[in-house]
Amino acid sequence: MLAYSTPLSTDLIVRYLNSLTYERRLSVHTLRGYAHELRMLCQLAGTRKFSELTHLDVRGAVLRFHSVGLSSRSIARRLSVWRSFYRWLSLHQPLTINPIARLRAPRGPKTLPKALSVDDAVILMEASCIKTANALRDRAILELLYSCGLRLAELINLDITFIHTSQYRSAGWINLSTADVTVLGKGERRRMVPIGSKAIDALHNWLAIRDRFLKHDPSPLFLSAQGMRMSAGVVRERVKRAALSAGISSHVHPHVLRHSFATHLLQSSGNLRAVQELLGHSSVKSTQVYTSLDFQHLAHIYDQAHPRAKKRCNSQPSIIK
């Protein structure tokens, strides 16, 4: 039985979450998100059974979520989890009505992923000339994130090599001899991504001094000052600090480097399917958002270069009477 940090109020919810764990093999991070959203459903139901909730109950809850400032995206995610639960519930007990059916979240502004310009990406990668151990480690992290388009969780779970024992199996690892990294992404989908030459050099420099950080577990590729596998929070902080030191004012976090990887690769190659495979997207629809970024880049060039598209001054033409 899967354990959760906060008790859930119904055995049905726990059974459903365990089905996601053992049948759909969702990640621990995803399961925590599902558990949180289902606690909200438990609060909405109160002392009633889930089968007793109506469309009006759920619609009223959506309006309350919206009124307290919950974003449209968060509401949509919550309804998606609830909808998935009710589909599962209908297979285990009779339902006279599905209160989530045909209910849509309020529309919010369509946002595109933020990516660095090519110039800013190069500045970030080459900014620091310091050769301290921490700086060499951070440079290797930045280069690997940008070179391979890794998710943060994929990066911190990397081992220095593939390890498989009775107690442990590597989720991801690097192979410098073949210049590739193997990671376990969302949905337990494993993929292999090439590592660029700049990232290979940065990794070699880091591995040359990595032994200074070894204290406990020798398997993690990236180690903290305490000799432990680096946490997500520490990596975010190091990436942010590196960007500020490089003079990049925009908020830079690990996922920005993943977006930058995808955008720059698509701009150069135009191969959407290849970018999909490298990112580990199960559907090309997830990758197509980067075509919008690519179009924005082209549109900007068009506006700046085309003689019939250049922005004109705000002054109004004179009117001859």
Image (cartoon, helix red, strand yellow):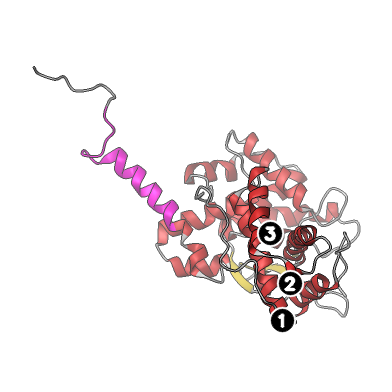
- Residue drawn at x 63%, y 57% is 59
Quadrant assignment, res 69? top right
- Residue drawn at x 75%, y 42% is 132
Reading the chain from its start, which is encountered first: label 3 or label 1? 3
Q: Which residue is mark 3?
A: 57
Judge by depth and name the residue closer to the eye, 157 or 198: 157
Marks 3 and 1 sit apart, C-alpha to C-alpha, by 19 Å
| Residue type marked 2 | Ser
Confirm or deny contact between disc 3 and disc 1 (CB under 8 A): no
Q: Position of residue 308 (x, y in %)?
A: 21, 39
Find numbered disc 3 in the image and state the secondary structure of the residue it sits on.
helix
| Residue type marked 1 | Pro
Q: Position of residue 288 (x, y in %)?
A: 46, 62
Q: Which residue is mark 1?
A: 94
Give the magenta range. 291-312
Reading the chain from its start, which is encountered first: label 2 or label 3? 2
Q: Residues within 10 Å of mark 3 (few under 14, many from 20)?
A: some
Q: Quadrant of the C terminus?
A: top left
| Any part of residue 175 in sight | no
| Residue type marked 3 | Asp
Q: Position of residue 24 (x, y in %)?
A: 70, 77
Q: Which residue is mark 2?
A: 51
Q: Residue furthest left?
A: 321
- Residue drawn at x 66%, y 47% is 70
